[in-house]
Image (cartoon, grey):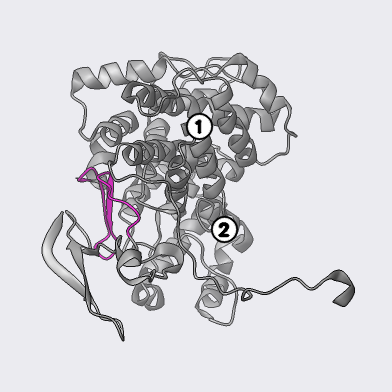
């Protein structure tokens, strides 16, 4: 990991100081500055941590310039096409893909934990029916620790594993209950004869009136969405989970913190924003007008779902979602639906227009996943909940990796203080 190469820091009036350079499997070399404060009395300033590696990780790697995303070394394209979500979950948790026996055992283990404590139903009843589902999720997931507290020794590998299995198994149930509550419909209990994603769709869309029969094409589409969103390196919500976990907080509280962070419009709300934008445009006839506005730097309008902060070329997940999107629209006969025709026209122009090509503003995964979820009948208010359901796997994997890292410490970022200098309080009568 650490090479013989050194980085030399020269500070005026001080002797040069050397720091080791660390080389990763993929990506940029890192200067190890952990001893910087002790050697120089200085700290670094890096707002947003854009040039700082906060941890060592073996989980996920992104190359934004190449448009590459790897889970445990495997390209996302191969995983999405050849594995289901629970296989990918097993991979992220254990570092290797399961064989047939391991897959069967793991799926069986997850199914044992799909129900939530019946007393938790009352938590939902304490929320207004029009509460945002993400607000409900923050509260309910955080409350899990009040119900499942017998396996909370996080130094114990078995306890960590039980917590992992519980939260991954219960998230579909919790998300579906949040949806049903907002609709005023009865909660649907899990059906363990169905696989993970089909069971989630049953709990979302089934009713006691009749048996729900999941459509395999739609189940596969949602399963791919789960896989593509399972982890994405050290993003804001993952870093939040790690920071919360570094204090020794219980995993349910950590995941609740991650959900709260993901809810931010700059993070997990992109696909919801994309659908809202399509509704604003309204009709294919107005696409040209909005494309013109998007090019005008003096206009505040922005095309949502195009370009990506990390991927400077293309989002590898978008290519997969584009294929899934077309399959779903065809399966449901929605090719001529107003909103979906509008989305496809917007995509066509963006892929052909020199302005978007030059700036590499290609459709990203949020553009297509929002369209797919809308086609599946999932309301936009639930999009970020779906995201959180999938990302819980990555959050829990990163949380456990942090706890088992021998170099792990409680997070304590430094600051560049720019407030008032030290001063004395003037007595009240003299102010």
Examine the rendering and report whether any part of residue 132 can be seen: yes
In the picture, the disc for residue 88 is: none
Q: Which residue is mark 1?
A: 252
> Which label lies toward us, 1 or 2?
1
Q: Position of residue 29 (x, y in %)?
A: 21, 64
Span colored in magenta: 53-74
In the displayed structure, does residue 140 sit left or right of residue 83?
A: right
Q: Are marks 1 and 2 in contact (CB under 8 Å)?
A: no
In the structure shown, which secondary structural element does the residue marked by tag 1 occupy? helix
Compared to residue 129, the image places residue 169 above or below, namely above
| 63 in magenta | yes
The N terminus - image quarter: bottom left
In the displayed structure, does residue 241 sit left or right of residue 312?
A: right
Q: Position of residue 246 (x, y in %)?
A: 43, 43
Compared to residue 331, the image places residue 108 above or below, namely above
Please name whichever residue, 88 or 43, is drawn nearer the observer in this view of the structure: 43
- Mark 1 to mark 2: distance in Å? 35 Å
Q: Which residue is mark 2?
A: 278
């Amino acid at each position: 990991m650490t090479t013989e190469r050194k980085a030399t820091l020269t500070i005026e009036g001080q002797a040069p100081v050397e720091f080791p350079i660390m080389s990763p499997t993929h990506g940029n070399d890192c200067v190890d500055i952990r001893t910087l404060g002790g050697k120089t009395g200085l700290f670094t300033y890096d707002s947003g941590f854009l040039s700082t590696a906060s941890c060592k990780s073996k989980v996920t790697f992104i190359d934004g310039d190449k448009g590459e995303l790897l889970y445990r070394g495997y390209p996302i394209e191969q995983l999405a096409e050849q594995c289901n979500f629970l296989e990918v979950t097993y991979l992220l948790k254990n570092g290797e893909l399961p064989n047939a026996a391991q897959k069967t055992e793991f799926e069986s283990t997850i199914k044992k934990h799909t129900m939530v404590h019946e007393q938790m139903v009352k938590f939902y009843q304490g929320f207004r029916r029009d509460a945002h589902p993400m607000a409900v999720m923050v509260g309910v997931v955080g409350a899990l620790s009040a119900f499942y507290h017998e396996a909370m020794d996080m130094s114990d590998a078995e306890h960590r594993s039980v917590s992992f299995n519980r939260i991954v198994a219960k998230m579909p149930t919790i998300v579906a209950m949040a949806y049903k509550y907002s609709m005023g419909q009865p909660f649907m209990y899990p059906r363990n004869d169905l696989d993970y994603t089909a069971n989630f769709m049953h709990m979302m869309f089934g009713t006691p009136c009749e048996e729900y029969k999941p459509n395999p094409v739609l189940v596969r589409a949602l399963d791919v969405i789960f896989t593509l969103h399972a982890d994405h390196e050290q993003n804001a919500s993952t870093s939040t989970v790690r920071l919360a976990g570094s204090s020794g907080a219980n995993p349910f509280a950590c995941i609740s913190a991650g959900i709260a962070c993901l809810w931010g419009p700059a993070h997990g709300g992109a696909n919801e924003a994309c659908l809202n934008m399509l509704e604003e445009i309204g009709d294919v006839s107005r696409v040209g007008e909005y494309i013109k506005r998007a090019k005008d730097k003096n206009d505040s309008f922005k095309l949502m779902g195009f370009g990506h902060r990390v991927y400077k070329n293309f989002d590898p997940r978008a290519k997969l979602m584009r294929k899934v999107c077309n399959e779903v629209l065809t399966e449901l006969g929605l090719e001529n639906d107003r909103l979906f025709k509008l989305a496809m026209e917007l995509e066509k122009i963006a892929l052909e227009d020199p302005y978007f090509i030059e700036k590499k503003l290609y459709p990203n995964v949020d553009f297509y996943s929002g369209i797919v979820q809308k086609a599946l009948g999932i309301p936009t208010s639930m999009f970020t909940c779906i995201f959180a359901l999938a990302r819980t796997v990555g959050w829990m994997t990163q949380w456990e990796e942090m706890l088992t890292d021998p170099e792990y410490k409680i997070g304590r970022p430094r600051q560049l203080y720019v407030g008032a200098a030290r001063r004395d309080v003037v007595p009240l009568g003299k102010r």
